[in-house]
Every structure is written in structure tokens, then in C-alpha cells.
Amino acid sequence: MTAAAISIDDVDIGYDGAPVQSGISAEIERGEIFAVVGDSGSGKSTLLKTMIGLLPPCRGRVRFDGNSLEEQMQNGAAPPFGVLFQNGALWTSMTVEENVTLPMDLQCYSTPAARPALARFKLALVGLSGHEGASPASLSGGMRKRAALARALALDPGVLFLDEPSAGLDPLTSRRLDRLITGLRDGLGITVVLVTHELESLYSIADRMLFLDGEAHRPVALGAPGELAQHAESAKVREFLRTSAPRAAAEAV
């Protein structure tokens, strides 16, 4: 049996040994768009940081293709994922192309001569051809998110982690970014894990979602957003999804 792209095995997350969420378990399949949702302060970003190795789990483990992150990165291998941070985190002293090339330089990916062309290809994937020499400060908010997404794709990862990708964007730009994310998933077969509070995006692109309850300090729902809006055991989850649902989704329930 093929291992899941990501396995979260009975994980507790938190800081200094004090759990914020306990008992998190999920199998994220290859090619899935998987959302982490919850109320403010519930630990969504903490879970993402734990999954990418910025925070150690208080208990349990996260595996990629059946192996821990440490096993995946043995012998200096690049991490098996790319990350789009909430604010983009682009280096303002570098051009857009240089930002995308930087992970290749750090990981000695491909040959030095080939890296600029690879960076331009990644930028083309996200619709930024012609902006290679631009400064990040000269770009719109949506363009900066796309540039950061191109950088997350720099090393051809099998998994993308997206932390609030639509934060700070107007609704039209947010919808365009949603279409870009699904297009990358469909075209490249990438697995996507996103933290989001945008319910339009959740209903539009997520195959499944995990709901973290900030009061109970544990996950209380796992499944497709539309199904959970109708059938989640937790009334809090049903209310959250129905109250915030887009018109089409609300009519479905």
C-alpha cells in the first residue's frame, strides 16, 4: 500500500511543552488540497510550523511518504516541501528572479548556469513572466504572493504549505490565487496544505479540512467542507461553516 503524502500521527503541538492542540491525526493524500481551519488562536499556524519542522511536536510525529522529516533530509537533501508564508517573506534587496533562484543556490539545485532559466520558468507558472527584474516592493499584493509561490516551487517539491495565502488580498485577487493553486495541483500533481480563514477559498478549493477547536484544544472535525456543514458532530463546526458559507454552499445545506 502506498504511503500517504503526509501522515500526522497523534500529534500534540505547542510551545515549551505546553500543548495548544492535542491528539491531531490525519492522512493527507497525494494531490489533495487539505485545509487547516479553526477559530482564532486555535493553533492553525502552530500546526503548520510543526509540520515543516520549525517547531518540535510535544508528542507524536509527522511523516512524509512514510518517513520523518529528518529521514527525508538525510545527506543534505532538500526538504520535501515548499512554503508560502503569510506575508510572502520576499527579500526586498533582491529582484523577483533572484528571490526564486535563492533556494536553488542554497541547495545546489541543478547547475548554476541553469538556475536563472529555471527561476523564469517557475515565474511563468504563476503568471509573472516579464517581471523577473522587478523589486518585490514594486509589485501589487497579489503579485508578491505569486512571486513567493514561485519561490516555494523552486525545488520542485511534492508538497506546498500555504499560510493564509489570501490574507490581505481583495476578493477578485483572492479568487485568482485560488484558481492558480488548483491549477498547480492539477498540472503538477502537488499536494497542498493550507491554513486559511477565508471560507470562500475553503469551499472553492479544499478537498478536505481539519477543524481545530480553540476551546477544546483538540481537532473536532475532519472531512469535506460541504459534508461537515451538514453532518459534523460538532455544532460549532456546523455553525462556523454555515454562517460563513458562500451563497451556493449555504443553499446546498
Image (cartoon, grey):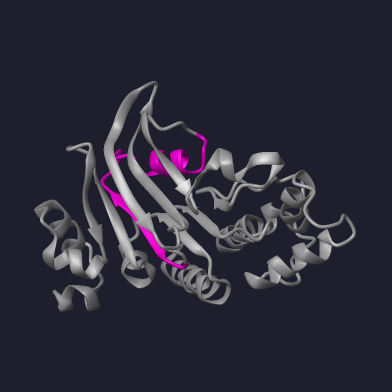
- Whether residue 41 is visible: yes
Q: Looking at this view, is 4 or 41 the one in front?
A: 4
In the depicted structure, whether residue 53 falls above or below residue 109: above
- Name the outermost residue toward the front: 1
- Whether residue 166 is visible: no
**In the displayed structure image, the side of residue 220 where residue 88 appears, left or right:** right
Q: Position of residue 78 (x, y in %)?
A: 67, 47
Q: Position of residue 142 (x, y in %)?
A: 55, 63
Q: Residue at x 68, y 45 (%)?
A: 77
Q: Position of residue 160 (x, y in %)?
A: 53, 57
**In the displayed structure image, the side of residue 26 where residue 247 appears, left or right:** left
Q: Looking at this view, is 171 or 1 the one in front?
A: 1
Residue 112 sits in quarter: bottom right
| Magenta span | 31-54
**In the displayed structure image, the side of residue 11 where residue 115 appears, left or right:** right
Q: Residue at x 44, y 58 (%)?
A: 3
Image quadrant for the C terminus?
bottom left
